[in-house]
Amino acid sequence: MYRHLFKLIWNKRKQNSLLMSEILVSFLVIFAVFTLLVYNYQNYRKPMGVDYENVWVINYDGDIGIKDNDSINIFYETLRRNIKSMPEVKEVVFSSNNIPFAPVTMQNGFDYNNKHISHVNSYTVEDSYKDVLNLKMAEGRWFNKTDAVTRYQPVIINRSLKEVMFGREGAVGKVYGEGADHNKKQVIGVVEDIKFKGDYAEAGYAHFVRADTASFRWLSRMMIKVTSGADATFEGRLYKLLAGQMKNSNIEIEHLANKRKNINYFALVPMIVLSIVSCFLIINVALGLFGVLWYNISRRRGEIGLRRAIGATGKSVSSQLVMEAMILTTFSLIIGTFFAIQFPLLNVFNLSAGIYLTALGLSVLFIYLLVMVCAFYPGKQAAAIYPAVALHEE
């Protein structure tokens, strides 16, 4: 039977080539969609690593008109005490601009044991940063006052950076960097991964450095942990306090939970756009398959009638048309799989091979189901053709 089907397909290779090309293009687009969906879904399943509820962000201008470092430190410490004196405030922390869910990135690279790690996100934080965001330590400890005077600069790295730098070895106490001692860094702790760019983004590599007395000159973000009862009335009082003490600064208060929603919307836009485009393509392919199969039935009524007349059942006629469509699909998928498999082999976009292979399997299954659905009804109509009517028309 299969030999007969291959012969029928080969005899109509010019007609079938366009249909195969259409299925091939559809498969590649579906593969891209599923790759993006699988990537985002795997990231979404991972824990956030940060407690964003009841955390507010205060944006302000770093330049407050004070030149002396000691005076700047006194000013911000006074501001911290005044904010913490409010009953709705649990903790206050100053940090660099790249706070969680902010569209700001600060990156650099590190060398360790003849290995270069690039695209490492760098965060300048205070000792209370861990308490405000409720970070989880995997190894070691967080910053404290004893880190003010050390031989090497103390740093904290996340789990992903620890695994790529040190593997299964313990990271605490390891020193990396080149040059003089003050340019080298010593790991004092490992924190669990934090998805700073929202639910659908990877945690990436991250290392944290402790803010010193000179950092207040350029820091321009403040995060405060508030009670669950903090409302708009408290926000008004907080703004009034800040505006009264930071008269030359532009002040904006945001909620970290809202920033998470906003950055998630931006991550969903490519998925939505690509899904809409693929839906239109799928509809066109489905209509094309349906039309081609229906046209083949009308042209092959004599052949179908003859087969029915010599004893072929309606089920066998229907199965033949469906199998022809599935064989054409298989040829297209073999070509498409060849191109798709290059992505994990060449490590395109630096995604894991598992994401590509999962997307490949889902794409193949989807295309087969699509073709089967489109071929089922025309095949059913072909099975309903009466031999006498078909041969009489012929």
Image (tube, rainbow, N blue to C red):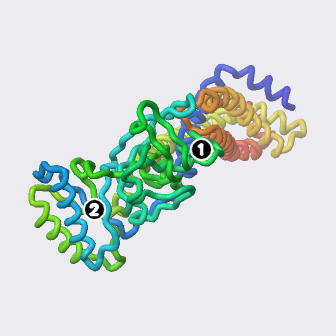
Residue hosting label 2: 254
Q: Is residue 53 above or below residue 112?
A: below
- Is label 2 in a helix, a strand or a loop? strand
- The amino acid beneath tag 2 is Glu
| Residue pictured at 89% horizontal, 36% vertical | 310
Residue 171 in percent (x, y) is at 57, 47
| Residue pictured at 47% horizontal, 35% vertical | 177
Please give the label number shown on residue 34.
none
- The amino acid beneath tag 1 is Glu
Please give the label number shown on residue 163.
1
Side of 63 where 268 appears, left or right? right
Residue 283 seen anywhere in this rendered image of the structure: no
Quadrant holding the C terminus: top right
Report the number of discs: 2
| 209 vs 312, nearest the viewer | 209
Side of 195 where 348 appears, left or right? right
Residue 17 seen anywhere in this rendered image of the structure: yes
| 168 vs 174, nearest the viewer | 174
Residue 262 in percent (x, y) is at 35, 56
| 263 vs 383, nearest the viewer | 263
Where, by quadrant of the figure, is residue 56 drawn?
bottom left
Residue 271 in percent (x, y) is at 47, 46
Quadrant holding the N terminus: top right
- Badge 1: residue crowd in 10 Å (few <14, some 14–19, many ≥20): some
| Residue pictured at 27% horizontal, 49% vertical | 215
- Badge 2: residue crowd in 10 Å (few <14, some 14–19, many ≥20): some
Give the CA separation, mark 1 to mark 2. Answer: 34 Å
Q: In this view, does 229 lie above or below 363?
A: below
